[in-house]
Amino acid sequence: MSGKIQTEIRLSKPLSQPEVEAFLNIQRTAELHLNQLTQLLRPHGFSPAQYNVLRILRGAGEQGLPCGEIAARMISRDPDITRLIDRMEQRGWVARSRSEQDRRVVTVTVRPQALAMLAALDEPVAELHRVQFAVIDANRIAMLVSLLEVLREESKARRAQRA
């Protein structure tokens, strides 16, 4: 195997398995694309995790979501969702309230100023993704999505069997 990933990460020996090469390519590409998103969000004061939380809350509507549900919907898991929400609340982007039925449940809602900031980013983020995937036609993008979904589902199934 003599893929480009070997040169990019300066491997001295060839990769022994195509699965390793695939994994390294997925990881390297995801990191590159995430860095580009980070650069786009930085001037607006958002991290990718904060942006993800705001999008989740926008989709949830006015009723908001409990912290645990936000954590479950995150693209990249944040082990300390409470601290992330704390920082976002301090910036005035979200509000928290305790459930009257169960005081342990904290519901988070997105504030109007954050919704406006999020709306202003919708097109620039969509354009970034169009540019990132411009070299791949729609059929191949659909195939890539399908293959990645198969990998995730299989990983979840194996994890469930071990539990």
Image (cartoon, rainbow, N blue to C red):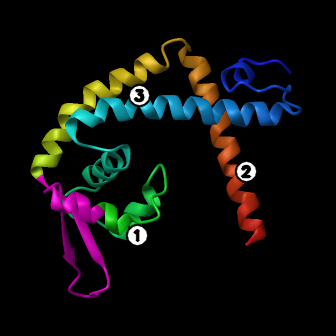
Q: Position of residue 64 (x, y in %)?
A: 25, 63
Q: Which residue is mark 2?
A: 154
Q: Residues within 10 Å of mark 3 (few under 14, many from 20)?
A: some
Question: What type is the residue that disc 3 sits on?
Answer: Gln
> How far apart are labels 2 and 3 at the CA level?
29 Å
Identity of the residue drawn at 19% across and 62% down: 89
Whether 97 is drawn above or below 144: the answer is below
Q: Position of residue 137 (x, y in %)?
A: 55, 13
Task: Specify whether residue 116 is painted magenta.
Answer: no
The mark total stands at: 3
Residue 36 badge: 3
Whether 7 is drawn above or below 83: the answer is above
Does residue 59 appear left or right of residue 37 in this picture? left
Query: Of marks 2 and 3, which one's residue comes earlier in the chain?
Result: 3
Question: What type is the residue that disc 2 sits on?
Answer: Glu
Identity of the residue drawn at 53% across and 17% down: 138
Q: Residues within 10 Å of mark 1 (few under 14, many from 20)?
A: few
Does residue 120 appear left or right of residue 11 in this picture? left
Numbered disc 1: secondary structure? helix
Does residue 87 appear left or right of residue 74 in this picture? left
Whether 84 is drawn above or below 162: the answer is above
Numbered disc 2: secondary structure? helix
Question: What type is the residue that disc 1 sits on?
Answer: Gly
Q: Position of residue 3 (x, y in %)?
A: 77, 19
Magenta segment boundaries in residue numbering = 85-111
